[in-house]
Image: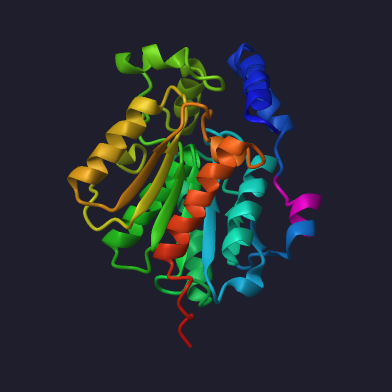
Amino acid sequence: MKMTTAKRLFRTVKRFPVNTQIGVLDMMRASKPGRAAHKAGTIETVEGVSVPAWWFNRQDAGRGTLVFTHGGGYIAGPLQAHWDWVIALCNALGVAGVLVDYRRSREAPFPAALDDCAAVVARIDADGELGHGRWAIAGDSAGGGIAITLTRRLVDADANAPACLILASPFVDADMHRAELDSFEAMDDSLTLAFLRRCVDTYAPGADLTNAELSPIHGMMDGMPPQIISAGSEVLLPDLRRYRDKLDAAGIDNEYIEDLDGIHAYPLITRSETAQATIARQVSFTRRHLGLDRAPPT
């Protein structure tokens, strides 16, 4: 799909009432890997966990593993586009992938999504399939926020934390009532503040929006791993710039990509030229930080 086609499609959906937008996302749900994923690699389930999670090319876990925490405002997903991103990154890097189908907010509120992802990571780590320095978390939108907060948990616990993060438009601040966002809403082809507010209200009703496990921009950055962050022309742009600045202030290695030709979480439109350029940078960044040019430990 070309980026211009994606923009037209999302602009149409954006005009729908929020309930209709959610209904469209429900119809697009791809909770199991489809034909494209089976054709691109081998698929297995992650055993011993309470939520569905899927291995992609598990046989490559000795080389490295990417854990995918999908977006969808905590109320939707995964979508086929998430599987497309799994395939693109894992096959380009020659590593395994794990996509976690965590409980959606209508089933279980905050912090259930985060806890589910943490449980899957703990399981595959206990199974010896997350080599130290040989794994990363990739997350988009709400899943990007989960990736950051899960990493913070692991760092604080002195556990096996990811070597780097791959973040596409991560949701870093749950306060969607800030005036600075209003002027960016018109430039966003896919998201409205009304939709984002519904997502937050459904996932974390009455919660303290400055809780760092809900809004990681309020958390500590010290000790966090290197991160590559992509941003499009979107309502979350000021938050993504603030997050980049906070990483810079803490001295955390990061690569920030702002492509205003792209939409929210645009790397997931993997066949577009805009996405392919950023995916190439994500691959290069991850290859470097996972040491994929070095032989894996024996």
66 vs 218, left or right, is right
Residue beneath the point at 64% across and 68% down? 47
Q: Quadrant of residue 54?
A: bottom right
Question: Does the stretch in magenta take in 16?
Answer: no
- Above or below for 10 versus 57: above
Number of marks in the image? 0
Residue beneath the point at 66% across and 19% down? 8
Residue beneath the point at 74% across and 54% down? 37
279 vs 42, left or right, is left
Using the rendered image of the protein, determine whether residue 173 is visible from the camera's viewpoint: no
What residue range appears in magenta? 31-38
- Above or below for 166 versus 104: below
Nearer to the camera, 49 or 92: 92
Protein image colouring: rainbow
Could you tell me residue 62's position as x and y percent?
55, 77
Q: Quadrant of residue 99?
A: bottom right
Q: Quadrant of residue 95?
A: bottom right
Residue beneath the point at 45% across and 15% down? 185
Could you tell me residue 9's position as x and y percent?
68, 21
Question: Does the stretch in magenta take in 37?
Answer: yes
Could you tell me residue 250's position as x and y percent?
19, 48
Nearer to the camera, 255 or 298: 255
Could you tell me residue 167's position as x and y percent?
45, 45
179 vs 190, left or right, is left
Q: In the rendered image, which quarter contains the N terminus? A: top right
Using the rendered image of the protein, determine whether residue 137 is visible from the camera's viewpoint: yes
